[in-house]
Structures are given as C-alpha cells and as structure tokens.
Amino acid sequence: MKKSEDFGEWYNEIVELAGLSDKRYPIKGMNVWTPYGWKIMQHIDRYIRHYCDDTDHHEVLFPLLIPENEFSKEKEHIKGFDAEVFWVTHAGLNPLDVKMLLRPTSETAMYPMFSVWIRSHADLPLKIYQIVNVFRYETKMTRAFIRVREIHFFESHTCHADFEDAERQIRENFEITEKLMRHLCLPYKVLKRTEWDKFPGACYTVGIDMLLPSGRSLQLGSIHQYKDNFSRPYEIKYEDEKGEHKYVHQTTFGMSERLIGAVIAVHGDDKGIIMPPDIAPYQIVVVPIPAKGSVEEVYSEAKKLAQELKNNEFRVHLDLRDVRPGNKFYDWEIKGVPLRVELGPRDIANNSCVAVRRDTGEKATIKRSELQDRVNTIIASISESLLEKATKNLENNIVDATSLDNLPEKLIRVGWCGSEECGRKIETTTDRSILGNDVSDASPRKVKCVVCGKDAENVVHLSKPM
RNA sequence: GGGGUAGUAGUCUAGUUUGGUUUAUGAUUCGUGGUUCGGGACCACGAGGUCGUCGGUUCAAAUCCGACCUACCCCA
C-alpha cells in the first residue's frame, strides 16, 4: 500500500479498506455509499447547505426525469450531453411517445419552471440550489468518487436582472468555494476555461481545479456565466420598472462527490486516509486497553472518557470490539480518524490518557483535567497542518515554462496570446489541456506567447486531466 | 473511439494447458467457547460455493465455443 509507488492502485485499495464505498454493485460506475463514506458526504453537504442558505439561496428538489423536448431547447447544451444520457423509453409495457431522460444536470429541468415563476423584477434575483444525484453515461474506466455514472452533487442556479448582477453572483460563489474548501483543508485553483472547453451553452466557465499526487489535475467544481443563452430559448423574462420585458441573466455553480476523492488523494498516506476534522465522521476514537483483572474498570472509565469528550461537542467513537488494541489502531488509521485516545490501567492510575495524532503520529500524555483544552488545540492544529502541507505541495508542483519541450507531470504555467490557433497547438504538442488563467490573480504579468511569441496577458495552466 | 487480460465462499487463491477420483484446493474472514489485550494473538469446534450471466458443443463442462455484464490495463 505505497501511495507514492502506484497512486491508482493505492486509491482503490484505500477506498475499499476504509469502507467508503462498495463498487461491487452490478452496474458500472454506480457504487454503493457505505455508512462511513456517506457520513463524510453528509458533513460536506451540511457545509454546502450552510453557506448556500447563508447567502440567501433556497434549497429545492426537482424531479429526476426530464422530457426530451425540454432537454433539446438549447442546442449547444444537447450537443454537449447527448452522448452521455440515460434514456427512459418505456413506461410499464408501453413505449413512450415523448422519451424521458435521467438528468445529467438540471438546467433543462428547472428552466421551464423558472419561466413560469419569474414575472417581475421583484422576483429577482432568484437563487436556488439542490443536492441530488445526476446520471452521466461514462464510457471510460470508472473510479470511486472521481469518475462515476451516478454522481452525488450540489448545483445552484441563479437568475439576475442583468449581466453585472450575475457577475456579482459569481464572485459570491468564489467566496463560498473558499469557505467550503477550508473545511476540507484543500488548496485549489480557480481557472477560466478556454472557449472550446467551456460548459455547453455557457458564455464562460470557471473550473475549480486541484492536483493529484500522480501529477494530473482533477476538476472539483465549476461556475458558469450563462448570460441570456438559456433564458432566450426557455423564455425566462421579467418586466422591469419601466414596463419593458427583458431576458434574465443566469449562473450556475456545482461541486460533486469528487471532493471526497480529492480529500483521499491529497491527505492520505501509506497507512490510509486522513480525514480533515471538520468532515470526519468520528473526530476522536477512544480505544480502551484492558488488562487481566482490570477489564471492567478500564471499560467503564473509557465510557466516561468518551462521554466527557462528547459533552465537549466532539464526534467520538468508543471502540469496545473484542479484538486486540493493535488491531483497532490499524483499522482507525485506515479510516483516517484524526485523533486516537488510548486509555489503559497505567493511565487510570495516573489520571491521564494518551492521545495520538493521525497526521503526524505524535503521541502525548494528557492529564484528564486538561483534556478539553488539549484536545481542542490538537484538533485545530491537525486542520491547520493538513492545509499547510497540501498548499506547499501544490505550490511545489506548479512549474513556469517558456517552452513546450520536456514538460514534467505537474501543473505547468505558460504564456498564451489567447488565439485559438496557438491554444490548440499548445494542447496538441504537449498532450495536455489548457485549464485556463487564474481568475484570482489580480496583477497579470507581462509574458510572451509560448507559440507565436507575441506579448500575452494570459498565464495559463496546463495539465493532463484525470 | 480502438485493442488486450481477467471473473472460482465476504476477500485472495489452486484446479482450466490435455473435458471425466478433489467431496472444487489452501489461506484469510465469519460464528461459538476459552486463554489473552500499551501496535495486526492463540487453541478447539463450526459456517460459508447455482465456479460472473445466458446460450451452445458433448455421454460428460469450473475446464471448449459465442454473446453479454463487470473489473483492470494499454493505445488514440
């Protein structure tokens, strides 16, 4: 189980051993969420709900099925998704006149309703989101959380009076992303996609990208400016103060279960995964160390200890299984519980316990009277150091290049004049994709286009996407 | 998009070359009882399989043939 030797194999093995998902369900790319993995996802969803609600988005739930005629209204959009939809062609024994599809994303489910809901400028902005599963017929090899056919994700959809207000929404989405990623201890890049790589139907697309240990990039989410590209075919109009009828401007924002894949990939080590404390199903596991003659005493003290920690708002698991302590240590290390607290006869005699950090392996003997403070400090420090380590790692894997020869398997930055001709050339000669320029970079440097040599304003990131 | 390899208890695996005495092998896992417990314990007894699915060849198929499903790999 060496992470550095074969990342792909390590990843599959860890997902299975840690009990995050079961891929034995007999449909390709449709895995079962097992309890431990689902708990992680629910913690992530909880933060998504919190930050969406906090910014006046409202949660909704649209039907899974979309009729074919609604799906077909925006022509770029169908072109982009046609090849990867699952169709419902029959109801009972009867073939359907109008086929239905399993949503690959919900624009075409929601927008007919938006057109009914929105009448006046007073109805704007409309900001909604939902947390659902979507279906995409992936033909490539699937991988738990990273490439699946049934995807758990959240999508927010907004409608605005004009382009500027939609732009404001996109800036708000960047802020939500930052807060969310902080809980996951994940560094990331916000990169504006090329014209030929944008979401089908969008005016522009911004990707939220991170880097895997293999050197490939992984897109964790995306934010789209639609302008009025969808509101025209779907007739989403409002009447402004002057009585004029105008089309709304729209945005979407989404992130998926890939976030879990990223957490595993970035923080994990040879012993297993390491859960960031904010999303860990259990932040602390209490392992009693019984000894001949003191079993009852150790167990009852361990129960007290666990309850004490629970009272201090930690998510705690007390492991009373009848297996040896060493066995439990290995199990919880694979599952990545941030902090392990051991309690044996020696500790009881000293009125203390032993705390072991999952990320560094550091052991500390803690007086029971100081338990709450010390544990608080350690948990906070684990979050900090996970983010710090991951950030350093990302920075060390970004390389500025002035030519396209002999590029390492990292995130490459090069100058690009912005022309499609040069862009395509960059992609074909390097066998990489242009992920785009960093939208958070406020002071663009003067560079030359790596292909034509002209002055360029775009410093774009290249990588091989997962 | 094109090609390749594989599928035998929860998991890994022997057996497939050359169809027929292996009761389909072994380990692990699981269950019960006991001794244990500060980094993967041990003893005893027990449980677990339509050999991926469907069809074909044959007196006879885990074994040969075909399709499909699934997993994994390589190339574009």
Image (cartoon, grey):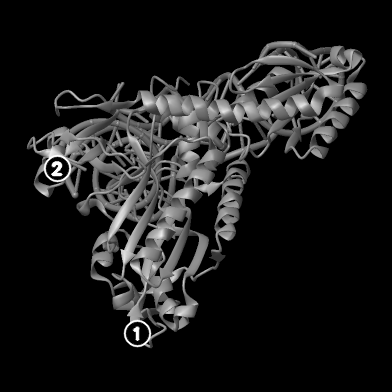
Residue shown at the point (40%, 82%) measured from the top left: A240
Quadrant position of residue A351:
top right
Question: Helix or strand or loop: what does disc 1 sit on?
Answer: strand
Q: Residue furthest bottom?
A: A243
Quadrant position of residue A284:
top right
Q: Where is mark 2, residue-wise?
A: A417
Three-letter amino acid code at disc 1?
His
Q: Is residue A400 left or right of residue A131?
A: left
Three-letter amino acid code at disc 2?
Cys
Dots 1, 2 in contact, CB < 8 A: no
Q: As rendered, which of B62 and A82 lies closer to the eye?
A: A82
Q: Position of residue A262 (x, y in %)?
A: 46, 37
Q: Position of residue A124 (x, y in %)?
A: 47, 74
Q: Position of residue A300 (x, y in %)?
A: 90, 28
Q: As rendered, which of B39 and A314 lies closer to the eye?
A: A314
Residue shown at the point (10%, 42%) measured from the top left: A422
User: Disc number at residue A245?
Assistant: 1
Q: Is residue A104 visible?
A: no
Q: Position of residue A149 (x, y in %)?
A: 40, 52
Q: Is residue A331 left or right of residue A366?
A: left
